[in-house]
Image (cartoon, grey):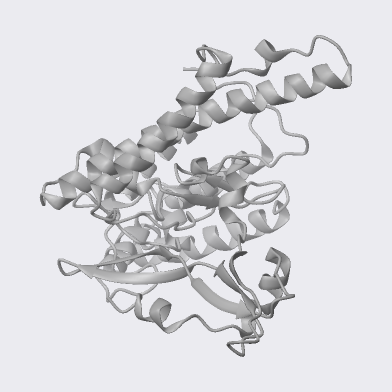
């Protein structure tokens, strides 16, 4: 099957050694159907697979059976043998096999090093000994190091997979009725919008093309666009609430989740880094209306909820009762001998002078010096 055409400006080239390294580390190494945490490959891996040096086999076997440390103590012989077979077929080491006319200097260099693993049949037995082949392995790897040194900017380097968190298990608050009613709220919002704009056939900007550039038509377009976006959002929100509700019901019955439900729990949220800032994937960021990136932003808010008018009769100077929400806290819960972790609210309650009503920014500035009320602190001891 031909590979797809690709183009990279000043891109790095594929090299066999990097391919070998990448297939001999996590998460490509399996033993007894379990992924082995092998983070660092070895020069001996290259000697056996890329250069076909059989004396490396015993070294590798000893290291696999050694006390676990770095690359040792991990079984990955099946990967080695598979790679050895692939490389042997690729390089075609029979004497009558001639290299491709388009072969790179790097390929020719490595073919030459592979020849050191096969002494002439008529050579003295010294050159067929395991000890001599280990000496050749030293030569092969020394020369290989020179090759990689001279092509550092040219050869694409291999990386061990960055280990992201996979949710081993998950639990939702066992209140199905709450999730049901949150879904009903979203459905009601969808219904209200549909009564005004009609059924939502397809959410696309192309269906909302501005008829003119007048201020009125622009406002009309913006309102319709936002309404359709909101309708699409609330439908998605309701579907998510339904999924959580179903999981809550099943978990309350101590029944196993389906494969799709397990995958749903594992895709709560993933933060990806790269050029242009962080990106947030998963269904949780989809619960934010404006942007998925809002799920990673601080959302410290405060509201004045009650005003105490000054009363000379009672000796009361008055004040404003505020409720606030600070940064989320990480909570740990043990349920049925399993520990779970997840974010929870941090709630605040305080009174300011009658002439002081805090804005969100002012509350955020004061937050480091504020204490949560006793009832809020006690809520985390459960």
Q: Position of residue 158 (x, y in %)?
A: 55, 51
Residue 185 vertical placement versus 109 (above, below): above
How many badges with numbers are in the image? 0
Q: Quadrant of residue 164?
A: bottom left
Question: Which residue is rendered at x = 42% and y = 84% of the image?
Answer: 374
Horizontal side of 55 relative to 279 (left or right) equals left
Question: Which residue is rendered at x = 47% and y = 54% of the image?
Answer: 161
Horizontal side of 332 relative to 317 (left or right) equals left
Which residue is situated farthest in the front direction here? Answer: 313
Residue 278 vertical placement versus 187 (above, below): below
Which residue is situated farthest in the right direction here? Answer: 214
Q: Quadrant of residue 283?
A: top left
The reply to whether residue 29 is in sight is yes
Q: Position of residue 70 (x, y in %)?
A: 40, 71
Residue toward you, 355 or 275: 355
Q: Position of residue 347 (x, y in %)?
A: 49, 71
Which residue is situated farthest in the bottom direction here? Answer: 315
Residue toward you, 180 or 96: 180
Q: Quadrant of residue 124?
A: bottom left
Residue 67 vertical placement versus 109 (above, below): below
Q: Quadrant of the C terminus?
A: bottom left
Residue toward you, 305 or 17: 305
Q: Position of residue 129 (x, y in %)?
A: 34, 62
Question: Which residue is rendered at x = 24% and y = 46% of the image?
Answer: 176
Residue toward you, 26 or 132: 26
The reply to whether residue 118 is in sight is no
Question: Which residue is rendered at x = 66% and y = 47% of the image?
Answer: 155
């Amino acid at each position: 099957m031909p590979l797809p055409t690709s183009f990279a400006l000043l891109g790095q080239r594929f090299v066999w050694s990097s391919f070998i390294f990448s297939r001999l580390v996590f998460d490509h190494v399996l033993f007894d159907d379990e992924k082995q945490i092998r983070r660092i490959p070895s020069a001996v891996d290259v000697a056996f697979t890329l250069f076909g040096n059989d004396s490396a086999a015993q070294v590798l076997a000893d290291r696999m059976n050694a006390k676990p440390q770095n690359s040792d103590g991990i079984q990955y012989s099946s990967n080695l043998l598979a790679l050895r077979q692939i490389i042997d077929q690729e390089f075609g080491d029979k004497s009558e096999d001639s290299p491709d006319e388009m072969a790179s200097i790097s390929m020719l260099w490595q073919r030459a090093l592979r020849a050191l693993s096969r002494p002439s049949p008529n050579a003295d037995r010294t050159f067929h000994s395991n000890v001599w082949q280990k000496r050749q392995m030293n030569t092969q790897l020394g020369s290989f190091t020179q090759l990689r040194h001279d092509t550092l900017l040219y050869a694409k380097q291999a990386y061990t997979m960055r280990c992201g968190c996979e949710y081993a298990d998950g639990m939702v608050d066992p209140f199905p009725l709450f999730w049901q009613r949150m879904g009903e709220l979203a459905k009601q919002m969808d219904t209200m919008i549909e009564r005004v704009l009609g059924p939502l056939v397809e959410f696309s900007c192309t269906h909302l093309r501005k008829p003119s550039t007048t201020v009125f038509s622009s406002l009309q377009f913006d309102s319709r666009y936002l309404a359709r976006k909101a309708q699409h959002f609330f439908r998605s929100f309701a579907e998510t609430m339904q999924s959580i509700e179903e999981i809550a019901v099943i978990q309350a019955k101590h029944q196993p989740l389906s494969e799709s439900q397990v995958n749903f729990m594992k895709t709560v949220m993933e933060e990806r880094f790269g050029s242009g800032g962080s990106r947030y994937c998963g269904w949780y960021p989809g619960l934010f209306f404006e942007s998925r990136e809002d799920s990673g932003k601080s959302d410290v808010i405060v509201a004045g909820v009650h005003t105490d008018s000054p009363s000379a009769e009672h000796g009361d100077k008055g004040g404003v009762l505020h409720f606030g929400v600070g940064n989320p806290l990480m909570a740990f819960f043990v349920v049925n001998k399993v520990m779970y972790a997840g974010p929870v609210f941090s709630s605040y309650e305080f009174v300011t002078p009658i002439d002081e009503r805090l804005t969100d920014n002012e509350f955020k500035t004061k937050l480091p010096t504020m204490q949560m009320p006793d009832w809020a602190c006690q809520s985390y001891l459960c």
